[in-house]
Image (tube, rainbow, N blue to C red):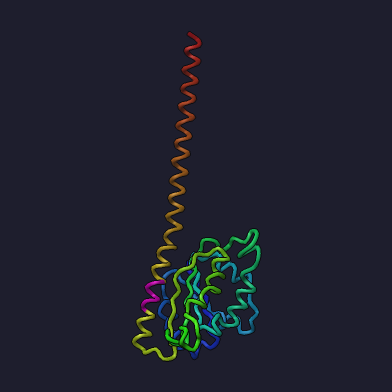
Amino acid sequence: MALLVYAHPYPSRSQANRTLLEAVRDLEGLVTHSLYDSYPDFDIDVAKEQAALSAANVIVWQHPMHWYSVPSLLKHWFDKVLLRGWAYGTGGTALHGKQCLWVTTTGGDERAFSPEGMHSFPFASFVPVIEQTARFCGMHWQPPVVLHSAHRTSSLDLGLAAQRYRQSLSQLITEFETKPALEAKARAESEARAASAAGSQAASQETSAADATLEGAQ
């Protein structure tokens, strides 16, 4: 299963994020979860969120960029759900090995994220905080999906971006939904071969012991 955690403070007003979301919503194996629809009062059901994360092999965080980071409810979600002893620290292995995909939109275009632009730094400078959140919890970081100039993107370009997002996420789901099943099958076959080899060895030892007894009797 793949879990898409969607965090847009004004989902009904969104154009870019809504288009991206609608492009992937019907993917087989994907569960979408809108935080602002589920928790308008910020009262997060931690056990429910952790159960959903535990069931997923692929985790997607999708949101508009707010002050070079995530919207307030998603930050609150990080604080409440990704707990020591569950997501990190001693015994905190619940998310280990899962795939994490970050999907975000920005108001500025790519030129705005440059030494000469209004944000003074390349966009890559703002990635590490989100990336390290995933990596600190033992997840594998996937190349982010970023749509710049979200307010001014043409319908054609937005549609193309949505298609690319759908393709990327579909491939990710297919790969990492299939991979665990194949690994489980390989483990089962390996265990069966080991058991068979152990049985053959035991039978051989019994035969050798029987032969030795007969020789002694002669």
Helix, strand or loop: magenta stretch: helix
Q: Position of residue 130 (x, y in %)?
A: 54, 74
**Viewer-side residue, 158 vs 207:** 158
| Residue displayed at 53% across by 88% down | 10
| Tag count | 0
Q: Position of residue 75 (x, y in %)?
A: 60, 78
| Residue displayed at 45% across by 74% down | 144
Residue 193, quarter of the rendered image? top left
Q: Is 43 situated left or right of 170 in this image?
A: right
**Viewer-side residue, 61 vs 4:** 61
5 lies above or below 8: above
Magenta extent: 163-168
Residue extending farthest top: 218
91 lies above or below 23: above
| Residue displayed at 42% across by 55% down | 182
* Residue 92 inside the magenta-drawn segment: no
Residue 23, quarter of the rendered image? bottom left
33 lies above or below 213: below
| Residue displayed at 41% across by 73% down | 27
Q: Is 68 situated left or right of 18 in this image?
A: right
Q: Position of residue 86 (x, y in %)?
A: 63, 64
Q: Is 134 situated left or right of 211 in this image?
A: right
**Viewer-side residue, 69 vs 79:** 69
